[in-house]
Amino acid sequence: MGLKIYWTEFSEKELQHIFEYYKEKASSRIAKRLVDGIYNETFKLEKQPEIGQIEELIKEREQGHRYLVFKNYKIIYWLNKTSITNFDTKRNN
């Protein structure tokens, strides 16, 4: 069994906010493409879970957060020793 990816409720809400923002500012097609891109970026972790860089802003937390970048968005995640990954999406401003 490979790595199983879980999204937190907060992360799912953030993706929805991103979608709504770009739907209003650009179009539904652009919003969907962006959100799909963020979501699909995480599939890289199934084969290479430690591919992301260490997240320096919260490195003192014991989970050992890492991140991936997709366009202007930082996808923050951590690896649970039981092979569960959680995500948080933040704008990389």
Image (tube, rainbow, N blue to C red):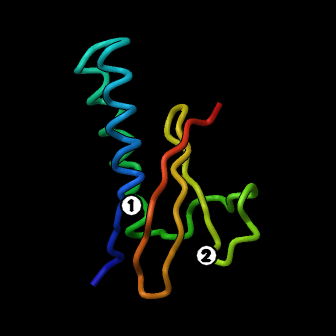
Instruction: State left or right for residue 25 relative to residue 70.
Output: left
Q: Position of residue 74 (x, y in %)?
A: 56, 44
What residue sits 38% from the left and 23% below the top?
21
Q: Quadrant of residue 20?
A: top left
Earlier sequence position, callout 1 versus callout 2: 1
The amino acid sitting under disc 1 is Thr
Q: Position of residue 17 (x, y in %)?
A: 37, 34
Q: Secondary structure at mark 1?
A: loop
Which residue is outermost to the left?
29
Quarter of the picture holding the N terminus: bottom left
> Residue at point 54% right, 42% down?
90
Q: Which quadrant of the figure contains the C terminus?
A: top right
Disc 2 marks a residue whose amino acid type is: Gln
- Estimate the x, y position of residue 28 in percent, counting from the top left: 23, 20
Q: Nearer the viewer, residue 32 or 90?
A: 90
Q: Determine which residue is flagged by label 1.
A: 8
Q: Secondary structure at mark 2?
A: loop
Mark 1: give few (<14), some (14-19) or many (20+) Cα within 10 Å. few
Query: Circle 2 is placed at which residue position?
Result: 63
Q: Is residue 39 above or below residue 26?
A: below
Where 24 falls versus 75 (above or below)?
A: above
